[in-house]
Image (cartoon, coloured by chain):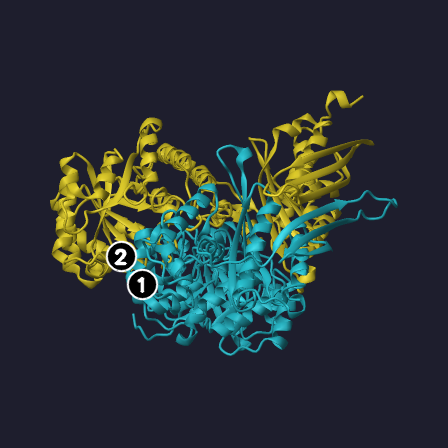
Chain colours: A cyan, B yellow
């Protein structure tokens, strides 16, 4: 493979990705994601299927006004004409053209089984459908990306026909011939062998690859296809898509750039990968996969004691690339498995003078083990751990205390027949700061924890103005099943941010309200601590 | 590759898997998972690292009494002796032997960088450490699996040394030589090339492979290694492990059996894969990955309209294998994208006489689109969708109605100084069944939704005894961010079970309590419906 050859990244998050369970994009979501992908430097953004989903035309209309791309081309997706009609009379092709973009993807069948059983036409008519549709779109001056659907299944069943499909598309003027593993069942060695054959024996050029992950090898299949000569890689940025998903482009871009020395997105955008991944997950309303290669929160998180020890000596000992290359960070997880080395790093962050053998170190370790035995888990809650260590080192002073609280959630019976029942939530909290008690009551429409947070924040604001700069970014609840059901505990993780930094805290209790409150209290304490030791408002210091 | 050759599956869920963020096994958890893996027919179960984690010895002691394996061998894991001492004096090896199992995994360094920089010894002493440790364990009659840590990084830096490490282990009597991609950065073609070279040029036998997923290709690397002649595959059953995780054995077992024609677990156990995956996730207290190849909830879920249409005609059109082969099921997801075809299938399940063009069909479609526009998503909540369709078809009668409710969560201030503050939750619910109103109040220690469920169930039980056979299996909450924050809605999914079947319902509201209540009400209504149209208790029918 020529290492300097450019690989074109074709992102279908907004089309194939929309076919994943749980994904439902608004037009605004789509505009935001498209802008982010362009900013990252992908080559093509496939953003809708106007023939099967009329709402997509609204997107393309707004995109024309609102999106100014610097590197990417916007694409619409549709099928070849239906059997037995002229291309210019086909409603699907009309909708595709109505999208008003310069690059169009059309898919055609490459597997005789599908031609006969699913679209129920002849092998010859299928070739004509491909030829006519491409010829027509090319006559309108469009760039045409031809997706050979089920190419690999087709090739394995009838190689001559599958290759005839590609040749037909090429001869009709298609700019790209994309080999699709639509059912996602291919494995890498066979994929490599087939693609290499097409390049070597058939002399086909401008090939693309489109893989699904049903055998767990979509990324690998895409990479071996590139190594065999393919120049366009289709996938979705987060790996979401129909069934098990599409080839994950965030992984592929990193593998291509950092492992195979290929150019795909510009080199100076590579360290935006991690932020782009989190942004696209956020807009797609999906939880980022913590274990995602390169961009996941755990991708450079070390838990095993020997691994942590190794990374402290030399990061390359347990990291295949530098986390900074994709804008990620190393994390050291605290747990029973990791032992003294990790805790030592956290202790020394707070007080560099405390040695590995100091009695404080042993006391802190014992305390953490006790808490972990009870069900706490500090791996995802480094900032609660920092507070715990500070407390043990005598480097912590509470900024406030909860005196009591009450939260009421209710729906009243309908007084006037026919009117809607009224539901509401009320929270009352009393806090004490240096003996001064502040009581706050709020009403809320969201939920008990939200109401409690609102009341607590309002009370704290009387004493500490910086509190207004922070907000909760994420709230996770986990029920931990004990040996028997009555021992079940609830573990709450809260991620907070002031727009610059982010911190995570933990709460644990039999009672979800209590667990949430613990995590909230830690979050506020940490915020006030970071703001230079809890600066009280001038007005309150009297 | 000889297709009839047996591939040995080596599962490290309980050792390498325990190094994943968020994983924390109790001894009982480990016993349960080991029993399940044996039942499935894996060859080796690596269950702990007694040298670095003394708690693991407790597991091995209990395992000896409580586990009776039919196919698997239980393994303990540790490192070769430390530099400069005799193998019999090494604490780690002593702990390993104390585990009292017949098969032991020991890892040794195969990368000169690690030998020099991390364990800080000479290349020659490292070879002696490997030789002495294996010779000693073999003299005790143990089966020794030698993990060549960082083998691939070592091979790329200094192939002669990496091969010398393998030869030393073989000559000392190791039963298996396992090639580890410890940092997880390998790609498939290079992996294949290196392994094929070892088999062909070095004549090495009894090779194993141990991959991590840092480049997104752990499954692929494992498969190509098998295709190059490796006979043991190490990984974790769910793919969990340090950083991005280990090679996912649930995927690999399916790929080996269904794609490469290899024997790994017994053929008649293959359709237990899916249930084993869910069981191990459950015991590990992790959410199953819906998109997991073969075993995920979405692996055979179809959402795109064309895909659903294709699968209705012939399942092979969009499924690479039959879901039944691994004990999974086909699911048809309802959504805007899927359109009429899917809804039609659900309508006809309830009333086969309603045609595609009937006015009811259009009315139901419109209603679903309206609800989806508001934020409902029926893809994961097929049973709420069924209730909705039944209502539209006039095939539904409420079994009960909520009149009103009130939930109070509070913590009272401490009356007696020094005593712990007391927190509690109380719920009051009134329901009406055919004009009869039942009021129930309960106290609870878990949370507001739990309290509400408890009260509701208690009230319903007065009318419907079958309700006691069902319980909630899962409860998921998702905040859907609207265009501005004040529009945020909460979507709740509840999975319920009566031990035989499972059903999922949805609730949506600005208010989490209301959303939860909606999903609860749907769940109870569905339960009563399935019990032959809400059989009222005899005593209540007077």
Q: Is residue B266 visible?
A: no
Q: Is residue B93 toward the left or the right of residue B470 in the image?
A: left
Spot occupied by residue B229 in the image (x, y as percentages of width and height): 23, 48
How crowded pointer 1 is (Cα within 10 Å; few <14, some 14-19, many 20+) is rated as some
Residue behind mark 1:
A315
Q: Is residue B358 above or below residue B33?
A: below
Residue at image x 65%, y 68%?
A58
Distance between mark 1 and mark 2 Cα atoms: 23 Å
Q: Nearer the viewer, residue A375 or A400?
A: A400
The secondary element bearing badge 1 is classed as helix
Chain assignment, label 1: A
Chain assignment, label 2: B
Q: Could you tell me which quadrant the N terminus of chain A lies in?
A: bottom left
Residue behind mark 2:
B191
The secondary element bearing badge 2 is classed as helix
Q: Nearer the viewer, residue A24 or B47?
A: B47
State which mark lies toward you, 1 or 2.
1
Q: Is residue A323 visible?
A: yes
Q: Is residue B160 toward the left or the right of residue B538 in the image?
A: left
How crowded pointer 2 is (Cα within 10 Å; few <14, some 14-19, many 20+) is rated as many
Spot occupied by residue B448 in the image (x, y as percentages of width and height): 66, 43
Spot occupied by residue A515 in the image (x, y as percentages of width and height): 57, 47
Spot occupied by residue B5 in the image (x, y as percentages of width and height): 25, 40
Residue at image x 15%, y 55%?
B163
Q: Are marks 1 and 2 on the same chain?
A: no
User: For residue A518, which numbered disc appears in the image?
Assistant: none
Which quarter of the picture shows residue A34?
bottom right
Q: Nearer the viewer, residue B142 or B317?
A: B142
Q: Could you tell me which quadrant the C terminus of chain A lies in?
A: bottom right
């Amino acid at each position: 493979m020529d290492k300097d050859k450019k690989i074109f990244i074709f992102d279908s998050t907004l089309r194939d990705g929309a076919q994943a369970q749980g994904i439902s994009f608004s037009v605004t979501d789509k505009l935001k994601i498209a802008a982010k992908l362009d900013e990252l430097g992908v080559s093509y953004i496939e953003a809708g299927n106007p023939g099967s989903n009329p709402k997509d035309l609204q997107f393309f209309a707004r995109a024309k006004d609102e999106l100014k791309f610097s590197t990417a081309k916007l694409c619409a997706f549709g099928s070849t004409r239906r059997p037995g009609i002229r291309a210019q009379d086909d409603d699907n092709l009309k909708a595709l053209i109505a999208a008003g973009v310069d690059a169009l993807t059309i898919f055609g069948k490459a597997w005789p089984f599908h031609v006969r059983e699913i679209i129920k036409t002849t092998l010859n008519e299928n070739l004509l459908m491909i030829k006519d549709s491409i010829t027509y779109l090319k006559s309108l001056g469009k760039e045409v990306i031809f997706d050979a659907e089920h190419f690999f299944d087709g090739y394995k069943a009838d190689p001559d026909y599958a290759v005839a499909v590609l040749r037909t598309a090429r001869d009709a003027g298609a700019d790209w011939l994309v080999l699709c593993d639509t059912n996602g069942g291919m494995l890498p060695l066979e994929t490599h062998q087939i693609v290499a054959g097409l390049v070597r024996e058939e002399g086909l050029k401008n090939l693309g690859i489109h893989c699904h992950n049903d055998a767990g090898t979509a990324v690998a299949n895409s990479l071996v296809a590139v190594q065999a000569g393919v120049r366009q890689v289709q996938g979705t940025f987060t790996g979401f898509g129909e069934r098990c998903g599409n080839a994950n482009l965030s992984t592929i871009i990193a593998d291509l750039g950092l492992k195979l020395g290929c150019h795909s997105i510009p080199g100076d955008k590579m360290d935006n990968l991690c932020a782009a991944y989190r942004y696209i997950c956020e807009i797609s309303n999906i939880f980022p996969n913590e274990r995602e290669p390169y961009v996941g929160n755990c991708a450079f998180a070390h838990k095993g004691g020997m691994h942590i020890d190794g990374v402290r000596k030399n990061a390359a000992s347990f990291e295949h690339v530098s986390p900074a290359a994709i804008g990620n960070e190393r994390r050291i997880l605290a747990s029973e498995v990791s032992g003294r080395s990790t805790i030592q790093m956290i202790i020394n962050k707070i007080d560099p003078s405390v040695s590995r053998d100091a009695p404080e170190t042993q006391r802190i370790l014992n305390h953490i083990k006790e808490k972990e035995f009870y069900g706490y888990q500090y791996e995802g809650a480094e900032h609660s751990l920092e507070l715990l260590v500070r407390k043990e080192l005598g480097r912590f002073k509470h900024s406030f205390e909860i005196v009591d609280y009450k939260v009421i959630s209710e729906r009243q019976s309908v007084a006037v027949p026919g009117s809607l029942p009224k539901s509401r939530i009320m929270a009352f909290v009393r806090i004490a700061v240096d003996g001064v008690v502040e009581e706050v009551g709020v009403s809320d429409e969201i939920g008990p924890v939200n109401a409690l947070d609102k009341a607590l924040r309002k009370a704290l604001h009387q004493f500490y103005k910086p509190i207004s700069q922070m907000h909760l970014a994420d709230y996770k609840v986990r029920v931990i099943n004990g040996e028997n059901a009555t021992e079940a505990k609830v573990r709450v993780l809260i991620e907070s941010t002031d727009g610059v930094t982010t911190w995570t805290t933990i709460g644990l209790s039999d009672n979800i309200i209590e667990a949430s409150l613990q995590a909230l209290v830690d979050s506020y304490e940490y915020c006030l601590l970071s703001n230079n030791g809890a600066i009280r408002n001038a007005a309150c210091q009297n």
